[in-house]
Image: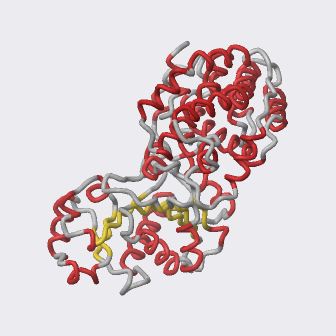
Amino acid sequence: MTAALLTLADSRLPAGGHTHSGGVEQAIAAGLLTDPASLAAFLRRRLTTSGAVAAGLAAAACRAVDTADVVAALAALDAEADARTPSPALRAASRQQGRGLVRVGGRAWPHPAWAALPRHPHHPLALGVAAAAGGLTARDAAAAAAYLSVSGPATAAQRLLAMDPITVAAVTARLSPEVDAVAATAADELPAAADPLLDLLAEVHAVRSDRFFAS
Amino acid sequence: MPPDHVLDDYVDPYAPGHRHGGPLRVGLGGPVGSGKTALAAALCRTLGTEYDLAVVTNDIYTTEDADFLRRNAVLSDDRIEAVQTGCCPHTAIRDDITANLDAVELLESRHPGLELVLVESGGDNLTASFSYGLVDVQVFVVDVAGGDKVPRKGGPGVTASDLLVVNKTDLAPLVGADLGVMRRDADAVRGGKPTLLVSLREDPTAAPVAEWVREQVRARALQGA
C-alpha cells in the first residue's frame, strides 16, 4: 500500500466520479433506499456484484500492462467488461468514468500504457492502468475498484436524502472488511457476478429528464 | 516505479493563455434567477450568426435550461449539451470539471469549426467560480433584485470574474436599488476589470455583453496566431 493508492481512491480525484450515483438515485426514487440500513444493504449488494466485477477487471488490466501486447490484452479485457455489463446505460456510465480517469491519470502518472487503452475505456481498465502507472499492484487496483464501488454511491445517497454525513461515513467504514475480502478474491479471477436490479435501475434512470446524476 | 518529477510536467496546459487551438470557452456563472440562461440565449441570438457556437448547460434538472435555449435561441439540438452535476453545480465547474470537459469535447468533435462555447453553470451562490481548466474567461451574473449590496459583499464571482454583469436594471426603482452604488462598489473590488449594467428584458440582444465576448474571441485569435 502506498500513497498513490490513496490518491487513486480519493473521491476528490477529479475524474468525474461525483456525477455518478451507481444506481442510488434510482433506488431512492423506487423507494428501495430510504435510510442507513437500506443504504448499507444496497452498498453490500453493489460491492459483491458490480464491485467484484470491477475489481477483477482492474486487477487484470494492471497485470496486462506488463504483457507483450498491451493493446491486445486491454482490448480483450474491454470486451470482457462489455460482456459483464448487459445494461447499455451502465456501459456508457463506465466508459464515461474511464475517459475521465484517463484524463487525470495520464497527467498524474505518465506511462506508455495509457496510449494502449481504447479512447473511452471501461472504468476498471483505466483504474488498472492508473495503478500500474502509479507503481501499484494488481491487488491495489482491485482494492481501489472495490472501494470506489461503494464510496461514490454512499455520498450520492448522503446528498440526495440529506442523510447525516457521519452516519454515512460510518456505513462505508464498517464495510471495509468486506471491501478487502472482495478485492482479495477478485484480484485473482474475472468474476461475472450479475445484478439485474442494478441493470434495471440504470436503464430506468437513463431515460429520466429530472435526474441530478449521470448514472 | 512512478516517473521522476519533471518540472515541465506541471506546467498547466489549461491555465489562462496556455490552451492553444479550439474555441473560446466562456463560463457564465451566478446566483439562481440572476439571468444566466437568459444571457446565454441572448448571446446565442446575437452571436449565433457571427460564430460557429455551442452551449453546455449545468442545470439542476437536466433539460430545463437546454429546453429554454432550444425554444429561445435558434440553436439546433446538436449544439446544446446538458451535464448532470450530482447535486453539486459548483463542484462540476471548479473542483471536478470532468463532466463539463466531456461535454465541450463532444461538441468540439461534432462541430470541428467551433469558435465559441458558452458553459452555463447551475445556479449557485456568490462563492461560485469556474476553473480555468474548463473556461478561458468567465462572466458572473448578478441581478438588481438581489439587492444593491451584492457587489459590496464580494466573493470570487464578483471580485475575480473577467466580466461582471448586473442584470435587471429595469427593476431598480421597484426594489429601491441604487445602480450608482452597485457600480461604485463593483469598481472598488474588481481591480479595473469591467462591469456592465444591463436589462436583458429591455435589450434582449445583450449588446454590450456580446461586444465584450467579440473582444475576447479576437484576443484569443491574436494569441493563437
- In the image, residue B117 sits, relative to residue A4, either above or below, namely below
Q: Is B171 positioned to the left or the right of B215 in the image?
A: left
Q: Is A99 positioned to the left or the right of A11 in the image?
A: right
Q: Position of residue B215 (x, y in %)?
A: 41, 70
Q: Nearer the viewer, residue A23 or B150?
A: A23
Q: Position of residue B58 (x, y in %)?
A: 51, 59
Here the colouring is secondary structure
Q: Which residue is pictured at 63% across the width and 34% down the height?
A: A42
Q: Quadrant of residue A187?
A: top right
- In the image, residue A104 sits, relative to residue B146, either above or below, namely above
Q: Which residue is pictured at 26% across the width and 53% down the height?
A: B155
Q: How many marks?
A: 0
Q: Which residue is pictured at 61% across the width and 36% down the height?
A: A101
Q: Which residue is pictured at 46% across the width and 59% down the height?
A: B121
Q: Quadrant of the N terminus of chain A?
A: top right
Residue A137 shows in the view: no
Q: Is B210 positioned to the left or the right of A65 in the image?
A: left
Q: State the residue lying farthest toward the bottom.
A: B202
Q: Position of residue B182 (x, y in %)?
A: 19, 70
Q: Quadrant of residue B208?
A: bottom left
Q: Position of residue B169 (x, y in %)?
A: 27, 79
Q: Quadrant of residue A93?
A: top right
- In the image, residue B193 sits, relative to residue B100, either above or below, namely below
Q: Nearer the viewer, residue B59 or A67?
A: B59
Q: Nearer the viewer, residue A71 or A11?
A: A11
Residue A146 shows in the view: yes
